[in-house]
Image (cartoon, coloured by chain):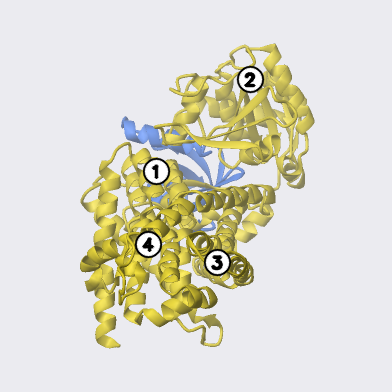
């Protein structure tokens, strides 16, 4: 077993899992940078603790995530732009 | 120059901004619309100081607009808005329980260099969550005064007013720039927040516990469905007594006039025109108030965002997102505020689709129509020993509207308003006990608008209709009732040709015309038409009993279904024109609704006639 920290996309997690935001999946793509800005505006930031709280009864998408003192609802596709280290 | 100083109230969504605005201005608010633009302008004079006017700008996360209403905030603050002058100062509202997030917007606002006061709101909640903030230090770091407030309990208001007055006198502030990207501002905000927060919070426990139930995959859906169901049952059950009282009052007025005034045109105008017409509409005030009460409470408690979360997937299947659920739910009260609240939807195509399907949500103005017909034709029995059959039928009509709205949206998104779907991203605010002041102001506003309509559009159209039901006069020795020879009878006769296949007689056809002014007028019109046909019995038995004797069940069902889709009222058409910036979409909306209404009523009438 290695002790290497593993990055996971937030949108791939399940309810009950917590982690720390490592970074955002940025590529030189305008739409994506804009979406990352939107995620930041909703409170996501490097180093913040996130906790996967709930998922929709239909198709398990969207999801509700606690970030800092806020709870944010978003779809898994956008959540996947956030990479976290799970604890 | 005695123009009042303009102070903009700004903040993130869910910071208690509107609650603070309400306590600062009281009931003397002015709600107007920017002409030609799409955003409501809510303003009011500061209580106790006539020289300061507050304007409540739409909640925003940053000065980079993500939706048409956030664009207004950005334009007004930068002084580039076409119709609003640049404010003299900013009152920035910050949620004390979510400091680092809300400070990011506050420091972005500081880069504007305008006079500014920060209201550190909801400090009572922060105390309960054991968050401790060094206010003096925060004020020093940001270079602007910070006042602790609790909007709902009116705490800190006196000091806030003093600071606003002082900020206006002191004039512009030094510009403080923390960087021009979200990331940089975020870092600066977190640094400040961590320096001035003396103890970290324990989070809002109640919210976590409530969400475990309310967002639970099964329980959550059960709660949402029961909430909506209760809402519709309550609209019927709770309103019964006040409605009986109003109806009784109108009845005794009519009897009083009939007894004390001489028989003649004036008595007829009073009893058959005004009281029968306007009265038939005013009687629904209790139902409208109950419906709005539910919606305002759901909004005020923070549940609305949860409903959006639960509904997102279903809305996605129609090509929309969960956010569209909120305007659509408001459209149950009235399509006009519903269509206006679609401004919060960032994607243009999604917004247009939401606007186009909003009239399919059964608005409260259709309630009079449903109530009268249901009371006349659906027996008041219990199904399974618990649910009233009448309530169930009403629920079914609402459901019919919802389902067809989703189908229409799916079709529109694939044809006329093609475009990529926007994503869903929404803050789920903390649960709060309902802010009764907000609820009360909302109810007061809706009741006022409703009664004003009853006193203007509806009053005028009933009088016009009354004239048209009498003129031209019937010939001597006519064998049909006088109304049949009047203008209404003639127009009704023309329209009857079109509407006969869906089971409408000439009285109904005639009532549909004034029904375009406002839907509830259709009922007022029926009241007037039938009242003139057989004055005495009508006054005694009321419209419900009269219809029961005159219409067949298939006609009644067809009429109900017609109103599920019925081409909407003039105000809805007007607001759609304004929100979509032209006649193209409102025309399209009227056409498709008319076609749907006709087709659905045709099927209902023909099927019911064949079966019964």
The shade of chain A is blue
Task: Name the quarter where the N terminus of chain B is drawn.
Answer: top right
Residue B568 seen in the current view = yes
- Sooner in the amino-acid sequence: mark 3 or mark 1: 3
Label 2: element kind: strand
Measured in 3D between alpha carbons, the distance from the residue under mark 3 to the one under mark 4, in whole angstroms, is 38 Å
Residue B231's label in the rendered image is 3
Residue A7 seen in the current view = no
- The x, y position of residue B399, in whole percent, is 40, 68
Residue B469's label in the rendered image is 4
CB contact under 8 Å: marks 3 and 4: no
CB contact under 8 Å: marks 2 and 1: no
Residue B5's label in the rendered image is 2
Label 4: element kind: helix
Name the chain under label 3.
B
Residue B575's label in the rendered image is 1
Dots 2 and 1 on the same chain? yes
- Sooner in the amino-acid sequence: mark 3 or mark 4: 3
Measured in 3D between alpha carbons, the distance from the residue under mark 3 to the one under mark 1, in whole angstroms, is 27 Å
């Amino acid at each position: 077993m290695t002790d290497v920290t593993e990055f996971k996309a937030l949108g791939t997690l399940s309810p009950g899992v917590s982690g720390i935001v490592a970074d955002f999946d940025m590529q030189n793509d305008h739409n994506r940078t804009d979406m990352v800005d939107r995620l930041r505006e909703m409170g996501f930031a490097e180093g913040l603790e996130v906790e996967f709280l709930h998922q929709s009864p239909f198709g398990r998408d969207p999801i509700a995530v606690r970030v800092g003192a806020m709870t944010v609802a978003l779809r898994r596709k956008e959540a996947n732009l956030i990479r976290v280290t799970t604890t | 120059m005695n123009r009042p100083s303009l102070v903009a109230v700004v903040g993130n969504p869910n910071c208690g901004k509107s609650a603070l605005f309400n306590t600062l201005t009281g009931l003397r608010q002015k709600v107007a619309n920017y002409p030609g633009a799409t955003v409501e302008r809510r303003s009011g004079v500061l209580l106790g100081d006539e020289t300061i006017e507050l304007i409540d700008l739409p909640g925003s996360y940053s000065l980079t607009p993500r939706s048409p209403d956030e664009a207004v905030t950005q334009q007004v603050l930068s002084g580039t808005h076409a119709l609003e002058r640049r404010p003299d100062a900013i009152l920035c509202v910050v949620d004390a329980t979510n400091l680092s997030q809300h400070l990011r917007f506050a420091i972005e606002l500081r880069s504007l260099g305008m006079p500014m006061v920060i209201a550190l709101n909801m400090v009572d909640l922060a105390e309960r969550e054991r968050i401790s903030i060094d206010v003096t230090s925060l004020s020093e770091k940001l270079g602007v005064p910070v006042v602790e407030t609790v909007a709902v309990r009116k705490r800190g208001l006196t000091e806030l007013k003093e600071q606003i007055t002082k900020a206006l006198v002191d004039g512009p502030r030094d510009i403080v720039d923390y960087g021009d990207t979200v990331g940089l501002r975020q870092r600066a905000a977190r640094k400040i927040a961590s320096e001035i927060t003396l103890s970290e919070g324990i989070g809002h426990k109640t919210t976590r516990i409530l969400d475990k139930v309310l967002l639970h995959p099964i329980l959550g859906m059960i709660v949402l469905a029961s909430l909506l169901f209760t809402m519709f049952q309550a609209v019927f059950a709770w309103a019964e007594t006040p409605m009986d009282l109003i109806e009784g009052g109108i009845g005794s007025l009519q009897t009083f006039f009939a007894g004390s005034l001489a028989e003649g045109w004036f008595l007829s105008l009073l009893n058959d025109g005004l009281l029968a017409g306007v009265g038939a509409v005013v009687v629904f005030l209790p139902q409208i108030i109950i419906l709005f009460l539910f919606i305002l409470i759901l909004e005020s408690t923070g549940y609305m965002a949860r409903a959006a979360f639960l509904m997102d997937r279903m809305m996605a299947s129609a090509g929309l997102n969960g956010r569209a659920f909120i305007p659509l739910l408001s459209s149950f009260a009235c399509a006009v505020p519903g269509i206006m609240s679609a401004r919060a939807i960032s994607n243009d195509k999604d917004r247009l689709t939401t606007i186009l399907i909003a009239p399919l949500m059964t608005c409260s103005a259709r309630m009079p129509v449903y109530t009268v017909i249901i009371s006349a034709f659906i027996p008041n029995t219990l199904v399974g020993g618990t649910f009233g059959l009448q309530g169930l039928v009403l629920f079914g009509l609402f459901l019919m509207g919802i389902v067809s709205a989703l189908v229409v949206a799916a079709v529109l998104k694939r044809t006329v308003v093609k475009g990529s779907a926007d994503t869903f991203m929404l803050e789920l605010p903390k649960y709060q006990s309902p802010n009764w002041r907000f609820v009360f102001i909302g109810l007061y506003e809706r009741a006022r608008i409703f009664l004003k309509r009853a006193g203007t559009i509806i009053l005028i159209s009933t009088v016009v209709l009354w004239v048209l039901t009498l003129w031209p006069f019937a010939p001597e020795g006519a064998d049909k009732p006088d109304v049949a020879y009047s203008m209404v009878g003639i127009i009704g006769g023309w329209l009857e040709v079109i509407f006969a296949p869906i089971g409408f007689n000439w009285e109904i056809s005639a009532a549909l015309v004034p029904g375009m002014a406002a839907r509830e007028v259709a009922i007022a019109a029926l009241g007037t038409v039938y009242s003139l046909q057989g004055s005495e019995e009508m006054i005694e038995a009321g419209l419900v009993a009269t219809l029961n004797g005159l219409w067949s069940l298939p006609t009644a069902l067809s009429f109900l279904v017609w109103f599920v889709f019925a081409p909407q009222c003039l105000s809805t058409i007007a607001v759609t024109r304004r929100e979509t910036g032209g006649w193209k979409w409102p025309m399209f909306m009227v056409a498709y609704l008319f076609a749907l209404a006709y087709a659905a009523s045709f099927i209902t009438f023909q099927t019911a006639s064949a079966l019964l």
